[in-house]
Image: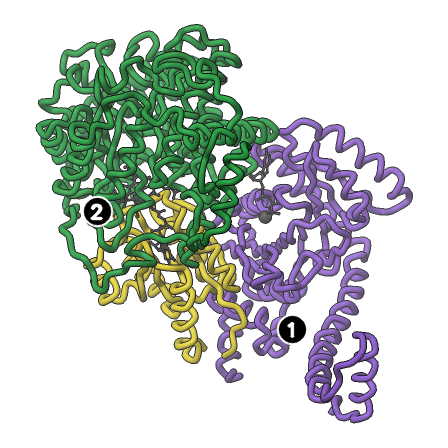
Amino acid sequence: MSNNFLSWKANYDAKKERKGPFFTVSSVPIDPLYAPGHTAEIDYERDLGNPGEYPYTRGVRSNMYRGRLWTMRMFAGFATAKESNERYKFLLSQGQTGLSVAFDMPTIMGYDSDHPRAYGEVGRVGVAIDSLQDMETLFRDISLDKVSTSMTINAPASIIWSMYVVAAEKQGISANKLTGTIQNDILKEYIAQKSWIFPPDPSMRLITDIFKFSKEHVPKWNTISISGYHIREAGATALQELAFTLADGFAYVEAGVKAGLDVDDFAPRLSFFFNSHTDFFEEIAKYRAARRIWARHMKEKYGAKKEESLLMRFHTQTAGCSLTGPQPENNIVRTAYQAMAAVLGGTQSLHTNSMDEVLALPSEKAAQIALRTQQVLAYETGVVNTIDPLAGSYFMETLTNQMEEGAEEYFQKIDELGGVLGAIRENFFQQEIADAAYRYQKEIETNERIIVGINDFVNEGKDKIDLLKIDPEVELSQITRLKDLKQSRDNIRVQTTLSDLKEAAQGTDNLIPKIMDAVRAYATEGEMVAVLKEVFGEYREQAVF
Amino acid sequence: MNKELLDQWLARLFDRDRRATAKLISWVEDDVEREYIMRAVLKQTGQQMVVGITGPPGAGKSSLVEALTKLYRGKDERVGIVAVDPSSPYSGGAILGDRIRMQAHGTDRDVFIRSMGTRGHLGGVTRSTSDVLRILEGGGYGRLLLETVGVGQSELEIMQIADTVVVVLNPGTGDGIQAIKAGIMEVADVFVINKSDLPGSERMKNDIEMMLNLNCDGKAWRPPVVLTSVIDQNGLETLREKIEAHQLYMLESGQRDERRKERLRQEVWRHWKDRLQVTFENVWQVAQEKWGDLENGDSYELAGELWRRVLREDKWHE
Amino acid sequence: MNKTRIRVLVGKPGLDGHDRGAKVIARALRDAGMEVIYSGLHQTPEQLVEAAIQEDVDLIGVSVLSGAHMTIFPRIKELLKEQNAEDILLMGGGTIPEEDIVTLVEAGHAEALFTPGATTTEIVSWIRDRLEASKEVSV
Ligand code: B12
Ligand SMILES: Nc1nc2c(ncn2[C@@H]2O[C@H](COP(=O)(O)OP(=O)(O)OP(=O)(O)O)[C@@H](O)[C@H]2O)c(=O)[nH]1
Ligand SMILES: [Mg+2]
């Protein structure tokens, strides 16, 4: 540290410091001032590079938002395919540039709407999709070669994706024109979201089958969205989100290679999904570090040759868990800051949460304000005018380096536990996350951390805003439609395709073509999952606290 | 509590009412009318043998209990399970996690699973574990299984409760050596090397067999070493058979009665300890009053003086 | 009657996978000296009620963030009735709109429901107070 810095420090220490806390959302302490001595000398070429150049710290495109803005992609879906279809058309008419489908719990877990386990859950937290028929309805009058569609589906991703591709086929659109993303990230299900169906090995096989099929037939599709979002929302810190997500990413790369693919054949289609929490600088540093780590490992460790394989492209969603029930309008403000962090961090697409996030699925009005928040950011604030404007800031570069170092330490631990699957088996991630979540809760309860409207600046009385309600009739009508379908389809063809699927599952052939055949026969998701469960079994977790 | 009411609950227990089974267990655990309840229960029970499953944390005890239960259910046996987890030494609370591992039997009314916290008791079980097993027997559960806390140390009270002790170890963990050091070898009636889907189990089996060669020379029962994998569903039927064989041996050799006699003695001793504990606490209360002006001196000195003051009064054992 | 330890079943019914809150609650109850049995995810109401009976818990605390609360709470309550186990209290929390809370509590389908922002301290004291009040009638 320079003398100059030390004398400032003496000055600072002589003054009174406000009660704090001076730590990040992730409980990392922050210094009052960052100066040249904080980081080792930054080598511009080695550590940052220009945007679009290795190691991509400053962004994955040379022109970033001056070329094209990020995709404003609002996650939506509820009730039936018909109602969600209307919401999508509304959102598109409002200037949204991509679709993002939320499915209901039965669809996420592989049950049809008429299954006893689906009772009370149909269409509640997303749209109910039982068969190709629902998928066709979901995109009625939306030309699938004109939009890019993201689908938040994991354990049964192979089935739902097949339905999408076949629905496009029915619209007369060939698979190689389709663009979009399926989440398809099973590792973070075991770690954080907990919507698993099959055990890890067969689940990984389904994923590599998708990689292979897509390479041949749906080349523009992002076959996986490796998700830190859920890990963060389950309670992880920013560093844990970064490290665990990248570790998952490397695990998929290794799985693809093990399945006989060349790294450059599938790595360009890997995409990521991060959270944006309220701690502005910490978040930006996280994105910058993520790009750099990914590029370095892909190049140096996995020997990727294609530039596209090195690029970490990611979607971002603002942090749902940061929002409050009381004074819901304050959430608009939080979301705006979080969105700005994501944009300064160079995200490729963005979902902004609605102010009613804590209370229910977003109402149309709340969703509109959230979308407008992005538009104000894009068109009014000017933060898009220059690329990676925080680069070179002592504070930002220090944080970015710390993120990278911390992540490398985690990678080492994970390796010692036998890689990501080993660490899952040992409950390593789960324990780390549970501990962080509990600490966060305690910090709020002891007022160490202030959340406006929760433990300070509280308003008496309840704030009322209008919420989206799901009509319980939705379940009945969905079940009726399903019954009709089961009567009207060619059930012999359904049975044949299902037993073909089962046979294929017992062997090693790519399952996607078999799933697509069953989809074309209007076999339901639940029927296909049931067949696969017979072969693959089911996963069970060992809960840790 | 009203004895008439209590008798009704006891009658319901013997009628196999699950609520009564559960409530009586709680009362015994909480020391509410424990003696009254247990005297009624012990009159009608004690026939069924207890299989105790012990081993280090995470060895797969609960998974094996679940798997065994499935086999017993296949033979239409009713299964009563007690699963013990450690209580927090700080708060006294506990998260009792074994039940999640036995989910397959969650709604089977012929399986009764009861989770217990150690509540400060050492030795891998709780103060009332053996009583609770007898209540389960009273409730009509003939196959009694006990899962201890994940332990590695030698203080193994399971010996005093179970007729058959199954020690579960894992390959490639150094469990074997630990077990030998901890004196687990002596308590095992059956060894299980679980997670045999992982590498190293054959080697571990050899190590244990070698130990047994040294230890079991000339003994009537040589503990079998069973390889199991709950994941691959391997070795489970063999485990069930070996347990069966041990129980038969216990009966035929008269060992079972021997162990029971010893157990009775131990239980009497435990009841004594409980009584003495109360007495001690009373003495301590009295001592508090005698504390008076005591302040100078080290703890030994003060303890001595206090002791003399209390003895002088000599009123505490009234 | 003097119960030394409060026993609670923390349950995750339905297909809901949101377990952050349930785990925080379970841990807080343990740290408050209670014995907590965690059901694990994806339980049916039948599984929860059977576990509650066998474990003789004082209280079932159910966490629902999947919007299925209007079917789940009444169903658990109904099963408790069928089993003559209504003395086991039913409460919970999660994403539950204010008016649904009123409906559920007024209909007796739940004793109390806590929503995001509730502190574990207030939940612990609610449980203690409520059980204190019902102790005398429990035998
Ligand atoms: C974190 C989160 C996630 C994480 C969950 C991680 C995990 N393992 O838990 C992730 C990102 C994986 C996720 C996924 C989804 N989520 Co989510 N998620 C949230 C979020 C942002 C916060 C929930 C949370 O954990 N908060 C922190 C904890 C501590 O609070 P809590 O659980 O509410 O608990 C407090 C109280 O409710 C109460 N409480 C809760 N349980 C209990 C139990 C007892 C016994 C007691 C006494 C009290 C109590 O006390 C706690 C302390 O204050 C909420 C919105 C929000 N801000 O509340 C949405 C929300 C719950 N999710 C929602 C949805 C729709 C989903 C998805 C279904 C989306 C989709 N279609 O794909 C998926 C599916 C997840 C699944 N597997 O079930 C909706 C539910 C809508 C509804 N019910 O009407 C919400 C409300 C967001 C929204 N507005 O759309 N989600
Ligand atoms: N690979 C493998 N894993 C197993 C096997 N049996 C159990 N496990 C896993 O080991 C972990 C611990 O299993 P449990 O049955 O909970 O072990 P436990 O001995 O009861 O654990 P505690 O009660 O916590 O001491 C779980 O993740 C099980 O899935 C097996 O045969 N093979
Ligand atoms: Mg166990």
Say which colour chain B has.
purple
In the rendered view, does B130 fall on the left or right side of C65? right
Asked if residue A2 can be seen in this view, the reply is: yes
Q: Position of residue A59 (x, y in %)?
A: 34, 19
State whether label 2 is within 8 Å of ligand 1: yes
In the foreground, A163 or B11: A163
Quadrant in the rendering for residue A97: top left
Identify the colour scheme used: by chain
The residue that disc 1 covers is B43
Position above or below: A219 against A388: above
**Mark 2 → mark 1, Cα distance in angstroms:** 62 Å
- The crowd level at tag 1 (other Cα within 10 Å; few <14, some 14-19, many 20+) is few
Residue in view at x 41 percent, y 36 percent: A231
Residue type of the residue flagged with mark 1:
Lys
What x and y, as percent, mark residue B139?
Answer: 54, 64
Crowd around label 2: few <14 · some 14–19 · many ≥20 (10 Å): many
- Rendered residue at 21%/40% (across/down): A123
Give the letter of the chain under mark 2. A
Chain C shown in which color? yellow
What's the mark number on residue A356? 2
Identify which residue, B199 or A498, lies in the foreground.
Answer: B199
Which element carries disc 1, helix, strand or loop?
A: helix
Q: Is residue A323 left or right of residue A536?
A: left
Q: Is residue A18 left or right of residue B279?
A: left
- Foreground of the two, A320 or A372: A372
Which tint was used for chain A? green
